[in-house]
Image (cartoon, grey):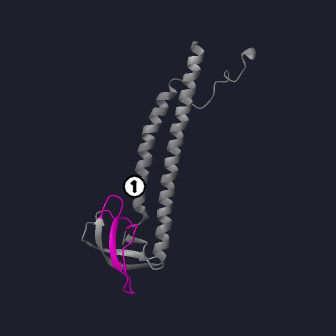
């Protein structure tokens, strides 16, 4: 295989790898921003119709924390999605919660809010780019990443 063909193939692989890395970074960044915006919107809706009460923590697991509480009409509620912002809760604990009067299964721990999503989302984005950018910088040492070699697009007769 001629040297020019090997260099062209290597440049193409670097360009594709760079595009994949930047695409992954942009997608994860967008998802983190959407997560934070969604948390703020959900909190705004809940805060406009919030009712405070005391709930008992039934179970704590990795993906959700279940609580049981009673609404003023005497109905017991155990939201299937768990409680929002459950950090530090333990099974059997009594905790002050806020729930949406219109949707009693939308619950969060009282006094906690969407601002708690900023640290994990921001940290994820920061560390992801702290990994991606040095890799891109290292790859750039071997040639341009995002621009095709202008000589590649010319036909052999015009070179």
Is the residue 155 above or below the residue 58 in the image? above
Residue 153 place in picture, x, y as percent = 69, 24
Segment tinted magenta in the rendering: 60-87
Q: From the viewer's perspective, is residue 66 above or below residue 142? A: below
Q: Residue at x 59, y 21 (%)?
A: 8
In the figure, is residue 72 to the left or right of 148?
A: left
Image quadrant holding the N terminus, namely top right
Please name whichever residue, 53 or 133, is drawn nearer the observer in this view of the structure: 53
Is 108 situated above or below 130?
below
Q: Nearer the viewer, residue 78 or 139?
A: 78
Callout 1: few (<14), some (14-19), or many (20+) C-alpha neighbours within 10 Å? few
Residue 3 lies in quadrant: top right
Q: Nearer the viewer, residue 125 or 3?
A: 3
Is residue 95 toward the left or the right of residue 139 in the image?
A: left
Label 1, on which residue?
119
Give the residue at the far right of this rendering.
158
SS at circle 1: helix
Compared with 129, 110 (above or below) is below
26 horizontally vs 90: left or right: right
């Amino acid at each position: 295989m001629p040297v020019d063909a090997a260099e062209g193939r290597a440049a193409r692989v670097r360009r594709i790898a760079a595009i994949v890395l930047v695409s992954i970074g942009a997608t994860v960044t967008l998802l983190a921003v959407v997560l934070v915006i969604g948390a703020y919107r959900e909190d705004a809706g809940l805060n406009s119709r919030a009712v405070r009460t005391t709930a008992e923590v039934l179970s704590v697991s990795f993906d959700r924390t279940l609580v049981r509480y009673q609404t003023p009409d005497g109905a017991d509620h155990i939201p299937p999605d768990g409680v929002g912002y459950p950090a530090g809760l333990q099974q059997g604990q009594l905790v002050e919660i806020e729930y949406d009067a219109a949707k009693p299964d939308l619950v969060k721990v009282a006094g906690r809010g969407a601002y708690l999503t900023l640290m994990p989302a921001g940290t994820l984005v920061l560390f992801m780019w702290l990994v991606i950018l040095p890799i891109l910088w290292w790859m750039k040492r071997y040639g341009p990443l995002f621009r095709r070699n202008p000589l590649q697009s010319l036909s052999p007769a015009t070179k």
